[in-house]
Amino acid sequence: MNFVVQHNHKWGSFSVLNRAPLAHEAFRYEANRSDPAHKVYGLVALRPNLEGSGQVLILEGTSMAGTESAADFVFDDNRLLPFLNKIRMPNGSLPYFEVLLQSNNMNGNASQSEVVGYRTSPN
């Protein structure tokens, strides 16, 4: 995957590594507890399963609120369907994808998230 959630054990913080940043993207997205904006990140990814016999939907985040932002994105048709239509292939099928979301932690809950990056791949 391009977006990888990492834990810094020394500092007790989480970040998202962007392995191949595009022009408008950062190399790393930090979810620092001392950040006044309380930024958190969520990741939604559709990937092949380990046996290659199906697919798996991955939801993860830099915190509970970050993971909540990923779930909120998936369960909100007004946000998910336009994204899926944007990445849909000409034959109507969906490619594998990963989408990185940024949100704010508001008392342990995620505020409305925004897409900060995404990738698609045929396999």
Image (cartoon, rainbow, N blue to C red):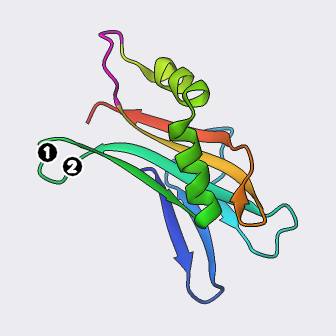
Q: Which residues are magenta?
A: 90-95
Predominant secondary structure in magenta? loop
Q: Is residue 21 visible?
A: no
Identify the element where label 2 is drawn.
loop
Identify which amino acid the numbered label 2 is placed on.
Asn
Is residue 93 covered in magenta? yes
Residue 49's disc number:
2
Instruction: Estimate how packed mark 2 is, as few (under 14), some (14 to 19) or many (20 or more) residues with alpha carbons within 10 Å.
Output: few
Q: Residue at x 60, y 25 (%)?
A: 78
Tell me: 110 left or right of 77. right
User: Could you tell me which residue is drawn at 21 percent across and 49 percent down?
Assistant: 49
Amino acid carrying label 1: it is: Gly
Residue 39 vertical placement versus 84 (above, below): below
Q: Is disc 1 surrounded by few (<14), some (14 to 19) or many (20+) residues within 10 Å?
A: few
Q: Where is mark 1, residue-wise?
A: 52
Q: Nearer the viewer, residue 31 or 78?
A: 78
Residue 47 is one of the magenta-drawn residues: no
Task: Say if mark 1 contacts mark 2, CB within 8 Å.
Answer: yes
- Look at 33% across and 12% down and name the residue there: 92
Q: Where does the image place residue 24, in percent across and percent down from the top left?
A: 69, 39
Q: Pinpoint residue 34: horizontal percent, then vertical percent.
A: 82, 76
